[in-house]
Structures are given as C-alpha cells and as structure tokens.
Image: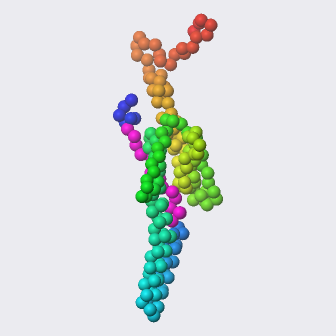
Amino acid sequence: MSDTQDTERVVARLRPHGRALFWPSVLLIAVAAVVGYFQGSFSESWQNIALLAGAALVVVLLWLLPLVAWLGKRYVITTRRIILRTGFFVRIRQELLHSRGYDVTVRQNGLQSLFRSGNVLINTGLDQPVVLRDVPGADLVQAALHDLMERSLNPIAARRQAEASRPAQPGQRPANRDETTAWGTR
C-alpha cells in the first residue's frame, strides 16, 4: 500500500443542525428589546439594576447555555473512523472504526425532513446504537459512511482484488485463474 492510502484524512466535520439555536436567538433579541425599552424608565435605581440582572440571568440560562451545549457536540468522519465528541467542561470522546462494520440508519421527523437533516443511527451490535443527532445532510452522511465502511471493511480482499486485476508477467500464471478443483480435475 502506498503512503497516500495509509494516511487518515478528514471527510467531514459536523455539528447538530443550527436550527437548534433559533428559539434561543429569538429570546436574545426579545430580551434586548425589553431591556432597551424599559431601561431607565423605573424611578428607583435598584429596579433598573434588577431589570439588567434579570435580563443577564435569562440570557445566560436560555441563550448562552444552549449555545455552549451546541458548540460542545462535534462529529468528525475520517477515512478510518468516526469520532464523536460531546461536552464542554467534561468531555467525552467516542470512536468507531469503519473496519469493524456497522449498520447505518437515518431517522427524520417532519421538521428534520424539511431541513434535510436527521438522526443518523449507527448500530455497532452493542446494546444501544450510536446516534449523530440532527446532522445536516443526513442522507449524504449515510451514503458517505456506507462508502467508507465498504472501502475499509476488508483491506486484505481489496489487496487481492488489486493483485488479480494486475496483468500477469511473462512466464507467470494469471492471478485471477480459477483455482477450484472438482472431482480431481480442474
């Protein structure tokens, strides 16, 4: 095998669909509008400070935390494996080798099919399938995973196939000759 076949290359880097940040972003805009409208309109200074503190709390809980959670999920598909990384403070990394073989299923609800995203379920034969949640282009991801798994499933068979397709040298038997023996004859 050559060095170009041995190197691992990144095929795709994915996150869950950005649609997950729609409602938190709408909330951020609404909070900014409310603060802009009401700031300075209260007679007591503590009420204005309470408005700012409440707005900051709402922004941190309902916009910043979903954003950090979304940024903390990453899926990397390489020519050899799938790497799932989750978490921000406590990180979890899970790897699946294409050569081990697996079953890939795409599950979409109505909203996901509208945006062409979906959950990619990778069944490795363990208790629970590994799920790439709400990835954009789920059908394309499924097709790519099938192709990558097919290529790396049996490298010995791929090498034999390459040797069989190579023309025979003079004085050498062809590699793809039928080697079966039935009842003592060829």
Q: Find the residue positioned furthest to the right.
A: 110
Q: Position of residue 71 (x, y in %)?
A: 45, 59
Q: Is residue 174 above or below residue 126?
A: above
Task: Please report the residue visible at 49 percent of the width from the left and 74 percent of the height from the top.
Answer: 58
Task: Please report the residue visible at 40 percent of the width from the left and 35 percent of the height from the top.
Answer: 5
Q: Position of residue 128 (x, y in %)?
A: 58, 45
Q: Position of residue 17 (x, y in %)?
A: 52, 59
Task: Please report the residue visible at 47 percent of the width from the left and 78 percent of the height from the top.
Answer: 55
Q: Nearer the viewer, residue 114 or 87?
A: 87
Q: Find the residue positioned furthest to the left.
A: 3
Q: Nearer the viewer, residue 172 or 62?
A: 62
Q: Nearer the viewer, residue 83 or 50?
A: 50
Q: Over which residues does the magenta segment extend? A: 7-21
Task: Please report the residue visible at 41 percent of the width from the left and 11 percent of the height from the top.
Answer: 171
Is 165 part of what is drawn in magenta? no
In the rendered structure, the answer to whether residue 128 lies left or right of residue 65 reads: right
**Quick one: quadrant of the C terminus?**
top right
In the rendered structure, the answer to whether residue 4 lies left or right of residue 25 reads: left
